Image (spheres, rainbow, N blue to C red):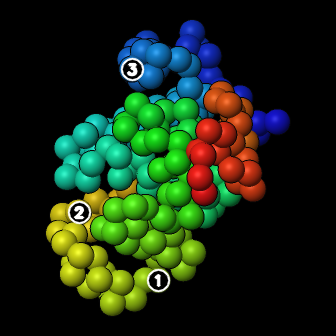
Amino acid sequence: MPTIKPIELEAASEAFANILKLMEDKVKRPVNMLRMFAHSPAMLDAYVHFLGALDQCQTTPLVRTLLIATVAQEMGGEYMLSGVAAFGPREGASPAQIEDSRRAKSENPKTQLVLQFAAKAVQQLGHVPHSDVAALRQAGVFDAEIVELISIVGLNIWRNLFNMILETPNDFPLVKVDQPLPGAGHV
């Protein structure tokens, strides 16, 4: 049971109702996490601006999607796992890729290193050795991408904490942390 109920579109101020509508039209459905953020117009605004900045990143939508799954699995965030399973294919991620990324694995060695770095950053609460950053550089990850990677991990920690603490009602087919993703095939 959610500790805060998602705000109804009609209860939001006109400006923020428009933002919610625009975001929900983009994904073609209401999204409870956005409606929970709407209780604080400042946090909804910050979240929407962060998403807009992601569109300008060098990090591809596919890798950003796989990072969502990695961080959600590490944190036990079933809302975000369910969301990435629902929306990941729109970003080019197959169910098998999403399932692999839950264990920080990828067929692409550079992507796997990025996912492993993200998992380690979550596990070690950010206390990642310099050698891990050096390994990213050696694999061809540029400084801008490293900054983006850390930022994307941070965003996903925020998303997972938010949804787990407030028990955001899951509006996607449920993916449990201890069960494989339906349709993932191999793994």
Residue 30, given in percent of the width and then of the height, sits at 55, 19
Which amino acid lies under the numbered mark 1 shown in the image of this protein? His
Does the rendering let one see residue 166?
Answer: no
Secondary structure of the residue carrying tag 3 is: helix
Q: Please name the residue that numbered disc 2 is placed on.
A: 145
Q: Which residue is mark 1?
A: 127
Measured as percent of width and height from the top left, residue 113 is found at 37, 72
**If you read the primary sequence from the N terminus, does the residue marked by circle 2 or circle 3 appear first?**
3
Q: Residue at x 53, y 42 (%)?
A: 95
Q: Is residue 116 left or right of residue 56?
A: right
Q: Give amino acid for label 3.
A: Lys
The residue to which callout 3 is attached is 26
**139 horizontally vs 51: left or right:** left
- Which residue occupies 46% across, 41% down? 94
> What is the spatial separation of the Cα atoms under label 2 and label 1, in whole angstroms?
19 Å
Closest to the observer, 140 or 33: 140
The correct choice, above or below, for 37 with respect to 123 in the image is: above
Q: Position of residue 22 (x, y in %)?
A: 38, 17
The part of the image, by quadrant, that contains residue 54 is top left
* Vertical arrangement, residue 11 with respect to residue 7, above or below: above
Q: Considering the image in quadrants, where does the C terminus appear?
A: bottom right
Task: Please provide percent x and percent y for residue 74.
Answer: 60, 64
Which label sits on residue 175?
none
**Residue farthest along the front direction in this orientation:** 186
Looking at the rendered image, the quarter that the N terminus falls into is top right
